[in-house]
Amino acid sequence: MKKILLVDDEKDILEFLKYNLEKEGFAVITANDGEEAISLLKEKPDLAILDIMMPKLNGFEVCAKIRGDKNTASLPVIFLTAKSSEQDEIKGLELGANDFIQKPISPLKLIARVKTNLRKIVLHADEKAILSVGPIVIDKEKYKIFLNNDETFFPRKEFELLSYLCENPGKILTRSAILQNVWGSDIYVVDRTIDVHIRKIREKLGAQSEMIETIKGVGYRMKNVS
């Protein structure tokens, strides 16, 4: 039974979603604010659903703490939000969120998104555990990236995007292919989101940033470096 951490300061929404998730066979632990959510991470949930506007710590702050802790860095995070601006979505994705669902929430849509994100974990676990391209070594099983033998932390989506590039060295990857393979077809993400994540990855790669080539008007390519 998969365990879901559900966080929202609106009690009615919390109980409504908890009921529907449990009805679907999930174990659900709940929190009413960001600080309580952080304390419940010790329960080792398989996925977190976070409201953005919460007291004490908002959803963005909770997500940042999740991604900054090596014990929870790979935890899938879905944001529940009443906001619809592109800027908020990009901020969340930069922090490593996996998905966004706007309020009012359809329980069926939420359950479908939860299952999709949990299924991705299983699929990634079945893929080749170690990737190596030039000075970049990715341990997908332990969720670690090494650059010139030094471990470097990458938030979840940056990790998945760099992994996808390294799985296809020398190949031109279109924006649509990147969106499909990293974010999934059932999640709406704007093209600029890819550019933001590539920029963050290049910053971390430093002198090796030129390994990721921009193919103007098409997408990106990881140089095939032995």
Image (cartoon, grey):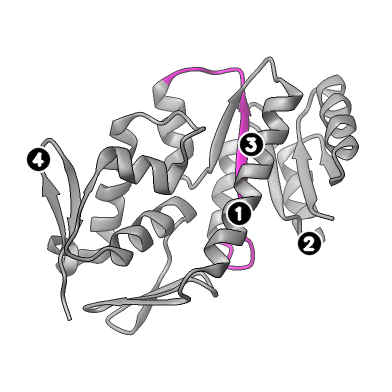
Left or right for 198, reference 114:
left
* Residue picked out by circle 1: 66
Work out how far the residue at label 1 is from the one at label 4, CA to CA, in angstroms: 34 Å
Q: Residues within 10 Å of mark 2 (few under 14, many from 20)?
A: few
First-in-chain label (1 vs 4):
1
Instruction: Give the residue drawn at x 63%, y 52%.
Output: 119
* Residue picked out by circle 2: 42
User: Residue 4: image x %, image y %?
Assistant: 78, 47
User: Residue 47: image x %, image y %?
Assistant: 69, 49
Work out how far the residue at label 3 is from the one at label 2, CA to CA, in angstroms: 24 Å
Q: Secondary structure at mark 2?
A: helix
Left or right for 160, reference 75:
left
Instruction: Give the residue drawn at x 42%, y 48%.
Output: 182
Mark 3 or 2: the one toward you: 3
Q: Secondary structure at mark 4?
A: loop
Do residues under tags 3 and 2 come within 8 Å of each other at their CB atoms?
no
Residue lying at the far bottom of the rendered structure: 149
- Quadrant of the frame with the C terminus: bottom left
Q: Nearest the camera: 209 or 194?
A: 194
Q: Residues within 10 Å of mark 3 (few under 14, many from 20)?
A: some
Q: Which residues fall within the magenta stretch?
A: 69-85
* Residue picked out by circle 4: 216
First-in-chain label (4 vs 2):
2
Indicate the amino acid at tag 1. Ile
Indicate the amino acid at tag 2. Lys
User: Residue 200: image x %, image y %?
Assistant: 30, 51
Left or right for 12, reference 67:
right
Asked where in the image residue 55 lies, by quadrant, the reply is: top right
Is residue 36 within the magenta segment? no
Work out how far the residue at label 1 is from the one at label 2, CA to CA, in angstroms: 11 Å
* Residue picked out by circle 3: 113
